[in-house]
Structure formats: structure tokens, C-alpha cells
Image: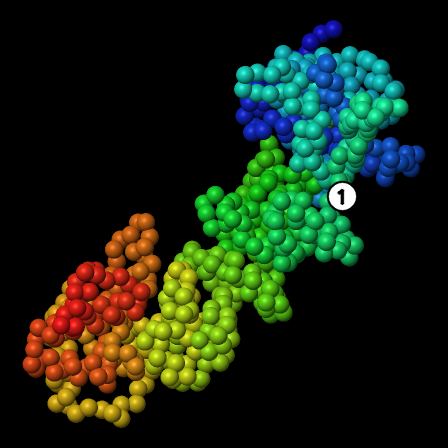
Amino acid sequence: MVTKQFKAESKRLLDIMINSIYTHREIFLRELISNASDAIDKIYYKALTDESLSFEKDNYYIKIVTDKENRALKISDTGIGMTKEELDDNLGVIAKSGSLNFKKENELKDGYDIIGQFGVGFYSAFLVSDTVTVISKAFGSDEAYKWESKGAEGYTIEPCEKDSIGTDIILKIKENTEDENFDEYLDEYKLKSIIKKYSDFIRYPIKMDITRKRLKEDSEKEYEDYTEEQIVNSMVPIWRKNKKELSKEDYENFYSEKHYGFDKPIKYIHTSVDGAVSYNAILFIPEKIPYDFYTKEYEKGLELYSSGVLIMNKCPDLLPDYFGFVKGIVDSEDLSLNISREILQHDRQLKLIAKNIKTKIKNELENILKNERDKYEEFYKSFGRQLKYGIYSDFGSNKDVLQNLLMFYSSKEKKMVTLDEYVSRMPEEQKYIYYAAGESNERIEKLPQTEIVLDKGYEILYFTDDIDEFAVRMIMKYKDKEFKSVSSGDLGIEIEENEKSSSSDDKDNKELFEYMKNILSDKVKDVRESKRLKNHPVCLSNEGELTIEMEKILNSMPNNQNVKADKVLEVNINHDVFRSLKEAYTKDKDKLDLYTNLLYSQALLIEGLSINDPVEFTSNICKLMI
Ligand code: ADP
Ligand code: MG
């Protein structure tokens, strides 16, 4: 018997491949099962085109048998088999794919289910075995042949006996090493779980003899082992089934079987798309936040299958970050895979699918918002923050997708409302969408700055999430209306100035304010008469882009840059306190100093800002008492 050399640069290639293409050893099983499935597909195809051959479904299957004693793992199929020449050609030439040829020769479209195309998968058998033996009898042939190889050394082919058409691949599993446990590839349960993971949706039954225990006959205590043939794979994936035949429970079971979450999804989307790109997908919108969702550890992504074979557990490119909470699977035959079939080429197809999916999710969320408001609000409690981050990130480029999905608590409705609802209720003369930012609705409700806006009968949106103000900055305008913080200097509200004070008063006040401004020189940009206060003596407003709330948030971050909003202390000249200020201004400057500092501290407290020197503040209060 002559040992033939692998052709071309096969020897080197084999080495490189075994050690570098595949990241997980266990995928050898996926590759061999995929080949077996291809071989059955081919005979099925032959039957379709050859009238003398009928395809009896039950006769076609893949069988996995372990033999621990001999460290052998056998993968058999009842597929088309290989002739001597084909063994030589397909297994003797690395990177030659008989399957790709088959597709070409038979002019099968891309969409056809045959998996093989690169001509390397077979050699992944050497990831776990020292010797690979292939015994095959081709369809239409009376002879069987045995191909055998110990790896880079080459291979032998010789005639042998085999009863039925098909192929047996026998792997001599490697001995355990210090770092690697190869025994597990002889373990039924491990094998079963690998099959479940990668090959669950191979269309033909994958059978395995599973060892079980039973009571010995006539015995109540003694057990004996027996084997039972089981079909390990589910064959038809739920996403290939007809939607009409599936119930809500089927989808929910799938959701929990896949460990997408412990909750029940609030919505599932099942789509089949045929067009520029074809795919099936099932997407779930969860109800509850996964515990690690808002951490770096959370990995977004969808499961990706190509022709029923798992390619990637979490393909991140299929989901934009802001929809990172969506779970589910995508199965497409149109993907260009790289040679290990573990990674995708970043290709047009994938981008198209991702774009479709994004639109699907957006539309579905809008539907829920429109038709199932309560459900949407539940969802929004969990993931609203993520949507707002989505608007904020990428310089607002996603605002068109997301802005209609936003909700904020409304001063008027006392519940969550959308921007659209807000704008459609705006009185004609109202120029802006008003918002107030703070820690909680309760705190915002008490902000003195809201008084004038509320008095006007205008609605205020409450911003209680850190990200809120930053997000609307990115939106800039919604339906042509700009956003305006109730604390901003210019509220764009006309004030009836019928209680206009005399000009001499005005001048006096100006001097007083100037004096106060000097007292607070390093703290505020200005001290001014307030046009918005009614019941409170003072409040802070801000000038410029950065609001006081933003200052708080930015300074609470780890990379705190100690930014400062330009603050203005506004004074209510109709308040009794103002009279005391005026009196102090003429009679007692020390007192004015004390009052000014106290009022400034009060304004800080109202804003939820901290007082620089609490000891000074309390001793100032004590001074009032003595
Ligand atoms: P690919 O599947 O990408 O074509 P492989 O290295 O996995 O590459 O297999 C090489 C070729 O060997 C296949 O294209 C096929 O022609 C042949 N082959 C492998 N396994 C079998 C099998 N079980 N039955 C029939 N042909 C097979
Ligand atoms: Mg293959």
C-alpha cells in the first residue's frame, strides 16, 4: 500500500489550519455533521431529479456512536457516499470542496441548503483525533473504500467492505494531555450538548445511543445499563415553522429554553424576509432588565444561523446599541462566512439584515406604544434609559428612529407622555417645550422656577434621569419646537408688567443687586430681579448652554472636570424678604452680607446642590437668632 502525499501545500496548510482556524475544538463535530447533512442533501437532490430513485425519508439519518474502550467516535451517514476518486479528490486536496462543485454542477442557487463550500471543515477532525478513518460507499457503486490518515503524514486508500451506501467517519480520539481533556469527546452527554448547540436544526435526524439505567428484571434494588437510540436534534427550528401553527406558549418556551431571560417577553416578532436578502428571524422584547444590562459585562447580540447551523452565539452587528436589550435569532443562507464559519465577513448582507431588523423593532415598539400603553410603560421603565442613551450617542444621528419612543412625566397629566402628545397640546403662543430637571418628580414639583411656567398654563416635562437633558440637547427641536429648561435665563414668556415700579425704584434695586453680586462675586454671574418667582424669595437660573442640572451630573462622574454653569441669583422683589434686603442695604451692610449669603445657600439647596461650607451656613442661621 502506497502512502500518498496530500497535494499542493497541503501539509503545511493542514498544520496551520488545525492550529489556527478554529478557536474551539468542539466544532469538529459541527463540521462532520454538516458534511453528513450535505451528503444526504445530495442524495435527496438526486432523487428529485432521478426517477429511478425514491427518497424514503426514514432511511436517511446521521448516527453517532461512541466506543470508549477503543477511544473511537463514529459519525455515520446514509448520504451519497464517495467513490475512490472522490475520496482522493475531496479529502486528499485541502481546500477543495466537493460540495461547492456539486452546487455548481447542478446549478443550485445560493439559497440551497448545502453547507460546505471551503473544503477545510473535514480536517477539523484532527483537532481531537490522531487517526481519521473514512469508510464510504458511493451511490451507484458496488465497491466501498477506506481512506485513512494520521494527519500531516498523508493518507491511504484501499478497498473494504461496507453494506449500505453512505459514509462512516471514525475518529481515534487523542489521549488526554495536561491542559486538555479529550475524554469528553467520548462522553454521551457532552456530545449531545455539542450537537444541541451547533447542529440542533440540521434537517435530518441525528441519532445517538444513550445509555440509561433500569431496574434489573425481578429485582427491586439492582440496576443495569441499557442503551436507547434517541434523536438528539430538533430538526425543524421554530423560526422555520409556519407562524399560524405556533402559539404564544411556543414562543415563550423558546425564549426560556434559550435562556434569554427569566421573564416573559412582552412581545415577539417572527419574520421571514425574501428579497435583496433572505432571512428568518424571531426577536423578543423582554419585560425585565437583565441584572447586568447597564454594565460593561452585558453583551448585546442575536444568535446567528446559516442554513440551520449556528455560526455565532451573539452577533453584535445585528443590533444597534440602543436596541441591545432585544433577544432572538436570525437564520440566513445569504451570508458570506469566513473559512472557519465562526466569523462573518462584514458584508452587505449582514448590514441589510441589521437595517431591516432595526426598523422592525422600531415599528413594533411604536405599535406597542400606540395600542398597549401599559405594556409600553412597563417596557420603558426598564429600557427607556437605553433609548435615551441611543439619542445622545453618535451625535444624535439616531434621533429620528428614537424620538417618538421617548416618554417623560408630565406636570399636567401626572403621568408619562410622549413628545408628540406634549406638542399637540401646546397653546398656540407657547414657543418652547418646557422641562424641569431634578432628582425626582416630588422634588421637581417644588422647584420655584416652575411657578411662572405653570401659571401660564403650560405643561412641564420632568427630567429625572441623568441622561435626559443631554438627550434632548441632541434632539434640539421636536416638531419645530425647541426644548427649554425652566431654569434658563430667558424663558420666552411675556410677563404682564402692570405692577411696574417707578424708575427711581428700579435704579435703587440695580444698585442693591450690584452690591449683592459683589458679595457673591466668585459664585454667581449676576444677581437680578426675577420675572418668574411668585411665592419664593430666590432661585437660581442659568445663562449659557450648561444648565445647573448638567453641572451636577457632569461633576458626579468619575472623570469629573469640575465644570460650572453660569448661575444667576434671581430675587423676587415682591417678597417680604426683599424689603428686608433693601432696609439692610441702607442701614446695615453687615446684615446685607449675611442675608445675601443665606439666600444664596437656600437657592443652592432648592436646586439639590450642596453648600460649600455647611458650618458657615448654620452659624449664619444662628446669627439670625441672636
Ligand atoms: P466543505 O464541506 O466545505 O466542502 P469539507 O472539508 O468539510 O469541506 O469536506 C470536503 C469535501 O469532502 C466535501 O465537499 C464533500 O464533497 C466531501 N465529504 C466530506 N464528508 C463527506 C460525507 N460524509 N459524505 C460524502 N462526502 C463527504
Ligand atoms: Mg464541510
Instruction: Provide residue 491's location: percent of width, then percent of height.
Output: 32, 78
- Residue at the far front in the pictured view: 626
- Quick one: 165 or 70, which is closer to the camera? 70
Where 296 falls versus 488 (above or below)?
above
Give the side of residue 520 with respect to residue 238, left or right: left
**Place of residue 605 in the rendered image (x, y in percent of width and height, measured from the top left):** 28, 67
For residue 117, say whether it is visible.
yes
Q: From the viewer's perspective, is residue 456 above or below residue 406?
A: below
Residue 617 percent coordinates (x, y): 19, 65
Q: Residue furthest right?
A: 52
**Disc 1 residue crowd, few under 14, some 14–19, many 20+, Cα 10 Å:** some
Question: Which quarter of the figure has residue 61?
Answer: top right
**Residue at left offset 17%, top offset 62%:** 616
Q: Amino acid at mark 1?
A: Val
Identify which residue, 430 or 568, lies in the foreground. Answer: 568
Looking at the picture, how far across and down is residue 493, in whole percent? Answer: 33, 82
- Quarter of the rendering containing residue 247: bottom right
Give the camera-side residue of 456 and 586.
Answer: 586
Q: Nearer the viewer, residue 221 or 552?
A: 221
> Which residue is under mark 1?
236
Residue at (59%, 40%) from the top-left corner?
A: 313
Q: Is 285 situated left or right of 524 in this image? A: right
SS at mark 1 in the image: loop
Q: Judge left or right: residue 344 versus residue 524.
A: right
